[in-house]
Image (cartoon, rainbow, N blue to C red):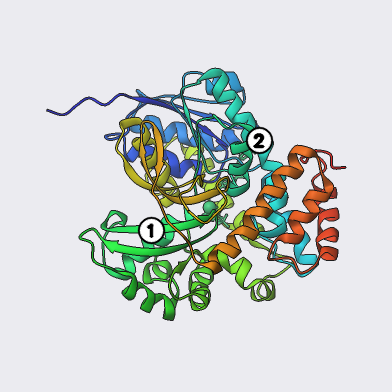
Amino acid sequence: MAVKLEKSSVVIAGGGSTYTPGIILMLLKHLDRFPLRKIKFYDNDFERQKVIADACEIIIHKEHPEIEFLATTDPEEAFTDVDFVMAHIRVGKYRMRELDEKIPMKYGVVGQETCGPGGIAYGMRSIQGVLDLIDYMEKYSPNAWLLNYSNPAAIVAEATRRLRPNSRILNICDMPISIENNMVEILGYKKRSDIVTKYYGLNHFGWWYDVRSSEGKDLMPELKAYVKENGYLVKSDLEEAKQHGDQSWNETYRMAKDLYAVDPTTLPNTYLKYYFMPDTVVEHTNPEYTRANQVMDTREKEVFTACREIADKQAFEGNELSMDEHASYIVDLATALKFNTYARMLLIVENNGIIENFDKTAMVEVPCLVSANGPEPLSVGTIPTFQKGLMEEQVAVEKLVVDAWMEGSYQKLWQAISLSKTVPSITIAKQILDDLYEANKEFWPELK
Ligand code: NAD
Ligand code: G6P
Ligand code: MN
């Protein structure tokens, strides 16, 4: 006899995000394993959220009129009576992402959403936004979980570790999942659960060191042989519209081939390109038209146009919007927490000895078993000198950013930018910092 599963109430924070419709479609697709009684949207931009909400209400109620729906900018309304907060806010929105990318580029330095000075600037904006979400949740639904995608996840995780040490927040990333989906295709398997992976690192800064079939067969040799030639690029990236499937992502996937070459004992996260090959990245970036411009001209336009059309027609056909690994992962995580499944998932957690020869207080990305009690990280053991050295430098950057935010310290932020592997000198670091500070006056704490 089928057991009747308890229904959840979810609030999506950053309701106006380009990813919100995908998460809604994914939630609706999995109602049999993660049933819902209520879906709420929360954003601090009423107009932006309304476009997405008007369409999502039609999508939800088309087949599920019993699910209560509400979109609001009022924290009390949003966070009362929820079991999960699924967060993907972008403090400063694309306008500030564009500046994060363009300011460093003026000085010939990588301009990126989460890596290097751009990621640091974004971190200085995001910390308060995510702390507010935690505080609302703890005030209005203290037993809920906050599943957080809001970037830069590494800096946000370090900040919440220090400033809200007992909070029920889990920071996550969809990049490894997306790469693992490509591994599945490379190996000729069907789904992610057909492979079991071991991975360690920081967010957007890590490596796979073991990949096996569910029967235990070592798949690393076959994967390495493929990555050596093609990176992670697979046929379906070129043929289908996927989340990480546009031309820019295809180049990134192909480039994993060059990242792999420096350490053929592991398989790299694609984000390492910004640290290993900043010169090549800068050379191939148009300083007048960066990734933020591309995203505004494609994903943002497409999602908002589709949502406006759905609202105008008051009808959803089913093919106007798509869902992706970003959405599937957060639903898997919520299911594991709610129904105690002990699913094995990569999460960003406090090291605490998981990586034996690494800072105990670092926030690391490692496989965990997820149950109703939260994540139980799996031991990694010792890591090689190359990875350890790189990670020590990067984790110090992330810690210095949080120091700078907490102390309002210009000096610490200058040190953070100087220490980033993407930045060549303290002189350039200072110039970039001064420009970023000027651009971020509205969002950063005052620095002294
Ligand atoms: P977006 O700008 O379309 O959406 C973000 C939304 O957040 C906007 O509607 C904005 O108004 C809202 N917002 C901003 N500040 C807020 C605040 N303080 N409180 C409430 N709402 C606020 O951005 P997007 O491209 O859809 O991305 C959303 C977020 O998800 C970004 O942080 C992005 O980096 C992150 N993301 C993370 C991963 C990951 O792997 N961790 C993957 C994809 C996207
Ligand atoms: C991946 C990363 C995210 C990041 C996103 C940017 O999914 O894991 O952390 O936000 O890429 O993608 P975009 O298409 O916005 O450049
Ligand atoms: Mn990510």
Residue hosting label 1: 198
Mark 2 C-beta to ligand 1 under 8 Å: yes
Q: Where is residue 76 drawn, in percent x and y?
A: 58, 18
Q: Residues within 10 Å of mark 1 (few under 14, many from 20)?
A: some
The part of the image, by quadrant, that contains residue 214 is bottom left
Q: Horizontal placement of 344 versus 81: left or right?
A: left
Identify the residue at image location x=42%, y=62%.
179
**Considering the image in quadrants, where does the C terminus appear?**
top right
Identify the residue at image location x=30%, y=69%.
219
Q: Nearer the viewer, residue 388 or 288?
A: 388
Among the two numbered marks 1 and 2 on one chain, the one whose residue lies closer to the N terminus: 2
Per the model, the C-alpha gap separating discs 1 and 2 is 32 Å
The mark found on residue 44 in the picture is none
* Quadrant observed for ligand 1 in the rendered image: top right
Cβ–Cβ below 8 Å for labels 1 and 2?
A: no
Question: How many discs appear?
Answer: 2
Q: Residues within 10 Å of mark 2 (few under 14, many from 20)?
A: some
Mark 1 C-beta to ligand 3 under 8 Å: no
In this view of the protein, can residue 182 be seen by the observer? yes
Pair 1/2: label in front? 1
Residue hosting label 2: 129
Q: Is residue 140 above or below residue 382?
A: above
Q: Horizontal placement of 281 versus 239: left or right?
A: right
Secondary structure of the residue carrying tag 1 is strand
In this view of the protein, can residue 25 be seen by the observer? no
Q: Where is residue 325 drawn, in percent x and y?
A: 41, 51
Identify the residue at image location x=56%, y=42%.
17
Q: Amino acid at mark 1?
A: Lys
The part of the image, by quadrant, that contains residue 234 is bottom left
Q: Is residue 121 above or below residue 63?
A: below
Q: Which residue sits furthest right?
A: 448
